[in-house]
Every structure is written in structure tokens, then in C-alpha cells.
Image (tube, grey):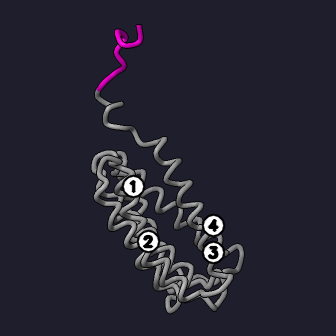
Amino acid sequence: MEKRNVLIIGGILVLTGIVLLAAQVTGWHFDWGQIWPLILIVVGCSFLFRIDKDKGVIFPAIILIGIGKLFFITQTQMFGPGLNTGNLWPFFIIIPGLAFVGLWLTNVKNYGVLVPAAACLITGSVFLGTEFSGASFVTFIVPAVVVLIGIVIIAQVFIKKPDQLSNPPDDKENR
């Protein structure tokens, strides 16, 4: 078995054990109805371990992590019983938009994926606005957009440009 696979399986078992132990110590009721979205999140995160071999895995990774987080929030009623998939459905449009942005970040010269990204993000945001119309919409969306722009700016620093990988700096040009 490959070393990376062993680490992933071992990490999953350790995290599962910690969750089960925390449930026993804190008296938390362990309910698969609330926990199953974590499987989607773990599978999505495991895809990220293969990103160095295949940049395309970023798309399903973001989809699985995003949908897993959305279901986890609604199943655990983390933000109260008022938030459910009935009024959070626009995130099923927004999450693929974020996946397209992630795909673009792995290849910044591929501007074509920004078109469906913008379409999904704008459409999902408009529908989200209809679900949470009023001041609460602005107080949630504006910070989310600011965070998204910040993530894009930060991610560009960590992504190696193709010209940086193959062409070392030429000393003759620096003279």
C-alpha cells in the first residue's frame, strides 16, 4: 500500500476515534443523521491530496466539501432551526461556482472557467438574496464576497505560474 494511502486511512481512523471519544466524554448524542455529511467532507479533502498529480480534482473536491458542509450545517442546526435546505438551496448553485474558481486557480491562464463561475456565483447570490431579503442579506453576502476575494488573492500567491516552473531567471538579463 502506498505511503500516502496509509496516512489517509490512518488519519480517518484517528479522527473517527476522536469524534467517538468526544461523544462519550461530552455526552453528545452520536447520530448518523447528523454525521453522514462528514463523509462527503473527508472524501473531498482526500481528493486534495492528489492535486499535485491531477489539477482537475479540485473541482469535485470543492463540490464534495461544500455540499458536505451545507448538509452538516442543516443537519446539526448549527445556526438554529431557521436555516434548512429549504432556504439554503441557492448554495447548490454557488458551490459549483466556487469549484469553477478553484479550477481557475489551478490554471490561471484558463479564463474560460470564469464565465460559468461568474454565472453560478451571481445567480446563486441573487436567489440567496430572495431567500434572505432585507438587511440580513447584505450583512451575510457582503462579508462573504469580501472573504471570497481575499481567498482568490491569497491563493494566487501559492499557485506556481507555468513560467516560474520551467524557466529559471537568466543572469544575462539581470546585468
| Label at residue 143 | 4
Please, what is the three-letter code of the amino acid marked with disc 4? Pro
**In whole angstroms, how far apart are the C-alphas of marks 1 and 2?**
22 Å
| Label at residue 121 | 2
Chain-order first, disc 3 or disc 2: 2
Where residue 22 sits, quadrant-wise, is bottom right
Q: Nearer the viewer, residue 23 or 91?
A: 91
Please, what is the three-letter code of the amino acid marked with disc 2? Leu
Please, what is the three-letter code of the amino acid marked with disc 1? Leu
Q: Is residue 43 visible in this depiction of the protein? A: no
| Label at residue 140 | 3
Residue drawn at 41 percent across, 55 percent down: 8
| Neighbourhood count class around disc 1 (C-alpha, 10 Å): few under 14, some 14–19, many 20 upward | some
Left or right: 60, with 139 as reference point: left
Horizontal and vertical percent for residue 129? 55, 83
Residue that mark 1 sits on: 48
Secondary structure at numbered mark 2: helix
- The correct choice, above or below, for 58 with respect to 32 in the image is above
Chain-order first, disc 3 or disc 1: 1
Chain-order first, disc 4 or disc 1: 1
Please, what is the three-letter code of the amino acid marked with disc 3? Phe
- The correct choice, above or below, for 72 with respect to 151 in the image is below
Residue drawn at 33 percent across, 64 percent down: 115
Tell me whether circle 2 and circle 4 mark residues in contact (CB < 8 Å). Answer: no
If the image is split into quadrants, where does the C terminus sit? top left
**In whole angstroms, how far apart are the C-alphas of marks 2 and 4?**
15 Å
**In whole angstroms, how far apart are the C-alphas of marks 4 and 1?**
26 Å
Chain-order first, disc 1 or disc 2: 1
